[in-house]
Image (tube, helix red, strand yellow):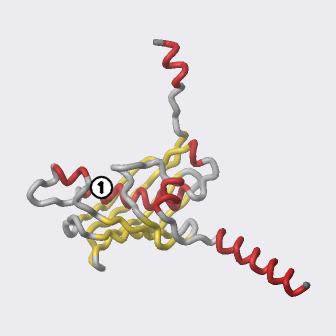
Amino acid sequence: MLALLAVGILVAAMSETSEAAKTTLDIVEIMAILPHRYPFLLIDRVIEMERKQRIVAIKNVTMNEPHFVGHFPDYPIMPGVLMVEAIAQTGGALLLTEIPDRDEKLMVFTGIENAKFKRPVVPGDQLRIEVTVLNWRTRAVKMQGMITVDGKTVCEAVVTCMVVPRVRKATAAVETAE
């Protein structure tokens, strides 16, 4: 009986430890953290995460994405600005896990530095987005991001972001005013 109790305590302790040290996120968990939705949610999975230090996400690039309709019809290339946004969203998935009231907050860009685009990204590519924290403050973070495809760098940038209150429209007040 005592051995069974000890095993139960050990299993419970291991469960709490693994939950606290979660290092991956699936799409449902990402959507619970980030406010972005299709067509602007640009990460599909988090495969590595070190609290307040580093995160690695995956983005599968498909021809079904709306920007390929016009960028460019005969030669689809993922816009560089969307790659920088993917870096920011990946960093946001790390940053916002530390914010207890994240449903009431937004993470917004405050700066982009040293953005470089080295190779085109096309449908069928899988982006590996690695973001390392350079400086973390209570409401702001500076992060170095690098995106690779098949081990080759396609984009890199330093982004700074800030957590701000999410302003919600008072729907009832708007309806009453009309």
Residue pictured at 76% horizontal, 75% vertical: 13
Residue pictured at 50% horizontal, 70% vertical: 54
Residue 154 image position (x, y, % from top left): 26, 69
Residue pictured at 23% horizontal, 56% vertical: 79
Q: Residue furthest front?
A: 1
Identified by mark 1, the residue type is: Leu
Q: Secondary structure at mark 1?
A: helix
Identify the image quadrant of the N terminus. bottom right
Question: For this rendering, which residue is in front, 31 or 138?
Answer: 31
Give the vertical position of 84 relative to 166 (above or below). Answer: below
- Side of 96 relative to 43 (left or right): right
Res. 10 image quadrant: bottom right
Residue 12 image position (x, y, % from top left): 76, 74
- Side of 72 relative to 115 (left or right): left
Q: Residue furthest bottom?
A: 3
Residue pictured at 39% horizontal, 53% vertical: 41
Give the vertical position of 149 relative to 140 (above or below). Answer: below
Question: For this rendering, which residue is in front, 104 or 134?
Answer: 104
Q: Residue furthest left?
A: 74
Res. 121 image quadrant: bottom left
Residue 94 image position (x, y, % from top left): 52, 62
Q: Residues within 10 Å of mark 1 (few under 14, many from 20)?
A: few
Question: For this rendering, which residue is in front, 119 or 178?
Answer: 178
Tell me the residue that label 1 is attached to. 82
- Side of 105 relative to 12 (left or right): left
Q: Residue furthest right?
A: 2
Residue 69 image position (x, y, % from top left): 17, 50
